[in-house]
């Protein structure tokens, strides 16, 4: 006579404080991660793209913005609009990157509304425009 015992388990990866990791066997069904509520605002994605493109230009991986536009399959003026987001004050960039997810409707901040703020050279004036006119509400 043979006896078969079935028991669900999964292997969990644990990260250590100094970058190390270890694995352990856990009893039960593996928990499913919950998807975040809402969607990431488009301006947050554009800000991240602008920072990445700027790093590509500064590192010399791409010779100029025209080449970058061709590689990204967008027009050169559109690439300029995206790269202009890097001219914003660092604290405004941070606010844009960490905007709350949008559940429904339009987000608080639009890229089109930020173009006037990007055109301002002084960071103090950018902050003033950003907070007072609030490109479709302040952040």
Image (cartoon, grey):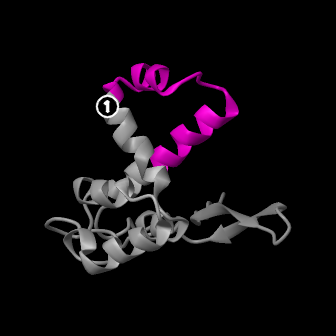
For the point 48% across and 67% down, the residue is: 123
Please state which of residues 123 and 4 is positioned toward the viewer in this rendering.
Answer: 123
Instruction: Check residue 94 for magenta coloring.
Output: no
52 sits left or right of 112 in the view: right
When the figure is inspected, residue 111 is found, relative to residue 82, above or below; the finding is below
Asked if residue 78 shows in the view, the reply is yes
Asked if residue 139 shows in the view, the reply is no
> What element does badge 1 sit on?
helix
For the point 28% across and 67% down, the residue is: 38
Residue 122: % across, % down:
47, 64
Please state which of residues 42 and 14 is positioned toward the viewer in this rendering.
Answer: 42
21 sits left or right of 107 in the view: right
Residues shaded magenta:
48-76
Please state which of residues 123 and 64 is positioned toward the viewer in this rendering.
Answer: 123
Locate the C terminus by quadrant. bottom left
Instruction: Check residue 68 for magenta coloring.
Output: yes
When the figure is inspected, residue 118 is found, relative to residue 71, above or below; the finding is below
Question: In this figure, what is the number of numbered marks?
Answer: 1
When the figure is inspected, residue 48 is found, relative to residue 97, above or below; the finding is above
Determine the residue located farthest toward the left in the rendered image.
105
Q: Quadrant of residue 114?
A: bottom left
Residue 103: % across, % down:
22, 70
| Magenta stretch: helix, strand or loop mostly | helix
1 sits left or right of 24 in the view: left
What residue is shown with label 1? Answer: 77
Residue 58: % across, % down:
65, 36
Q: Quadrant of residue 35?
A: bottom left
For the point 38% across and 43% down, the residue is: 82
Residue 86: % across, % down:
49, 51
Locate the N terminus by quadrant. bottom right
For the point 16% across and 68% down, the residue is: 104
């Amino acid at each position: 006579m043979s006896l078969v015992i079935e028991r669900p388990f999964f292997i969990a990866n644990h990260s250590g404080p100094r970058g190390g990791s270890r694995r352990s066997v856990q009893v039960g069904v593996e928990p499913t991660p919950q998807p975040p509520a809402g969607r990431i605002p488009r301006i947050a994605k554009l800000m991240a793209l602008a920072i990445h493109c700027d790093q590509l230009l500064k590192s010399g991986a791409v010779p100029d913005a025209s080449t970058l536009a061709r590689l990204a399959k967008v027009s050169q003026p559109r690439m300029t609009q995206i790269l202009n987001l890097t001219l914003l004050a660092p604290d405004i960039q941070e606010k844009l990157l960490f905007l709350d997810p949008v559940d429904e409707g339009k987000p608080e901040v639009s890229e089109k509304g930020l173009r006037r703020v990007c055109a301002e050279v002084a960071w103090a004036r950018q902050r003033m425009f950003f907070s007072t006119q609030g490109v479709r509400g302040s952040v």
